[in-house]
Image (cartoon, helix red, strand yellow):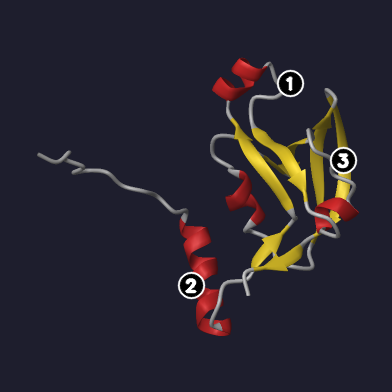
Amino acid sequence: TGTVTEGLGFAIPINTARVVSEQIIQNGHVSRPYLGISWQPITPRVAAIYRLPVQYGVYITDVAANSPGSQARLQVGDIITAIDNTTLDETHAYINTLFQYSAGDKVTLTINRNGKPIQVQATLGESGQ
C-alpha cells in the first residue's frame, strides 16, 4: 500500500506569487534577479553542526565568473546575512528577499567573511529568459 500524504502542502509567499504572475502577464516569462552564486541555506541547526558564526543566511559555495557576485568580489565561504535592510532569517529567506528586487537594482549585501561582518555593493543581473 502507498503512503498517505493528505494534508501535505507547500507555501509560496503572496508577494512572490504576485511578482511572478505580473511578469508572466507583461513579458510572457519570469525575469529573476541574478547574483551568480551557488549557495546553501544556514539555519540554527546547520550553524550549530558546522560551528558557523551566524544563525541564518546563505553560505556561498561558488561564484560564477563575470557575474554580479564576482564583480562585487564575493568569495566562496562568505555568508550573506542581509540584503539592503532585510536581515535573512526564518521569515526572510534568501530567494524570497532577492525576488523583491529587479535586474539592474543596486543592493548592499551584508556578509560575514572570516567571522567579520562587511558590506559590499552589487548590481543584480537578470536570469530566466
Work out how far the residue at label 2 is from the one at label 3, CA to CA, in angstroms: 32 Å
Q: Rate crowding at label 1 as few (under 14), some (14 to 19) or many (20 or more) other CA atoms within 10 Å.
A: some
Q: Sequence order check: which comes first, mark 2 or mark 1? A: 2
Q: In which quarter of the image is residue 107?
A: bottom right
SS label for mark 1: loop
* Amino acid type, callout 2: Ser
The residue labelled by disc 2 is: 21
Q: Is residue 58 left or right of residue 124?
A: left
Image quarter (top left, top right, bottom left or bottom right) of the N terminus: top left
SS label for mark 3: strand
Q: Rate crowding at label 2 as few (under 14), some (14 to 19) or many (20 or more) other CA atoms within 10 Å.
A: some
Q: In which quarter of the image is residue 7?
A: top left
The one of 105 and 128 positioned closer to us in this rendering: 128
The residue labelled by disc 1 is: 53
Q: Are marks 2 and 3 in contact (CB under 8 Å)?
A: no
Q: Is residue 55 left or right of residue 105?
A: left
Percent coordinates x, y for residue 23 in the rendering: 56, 75
The residue labelled by disc 3 is: 119
* Amino acid type, callout 1: Pro
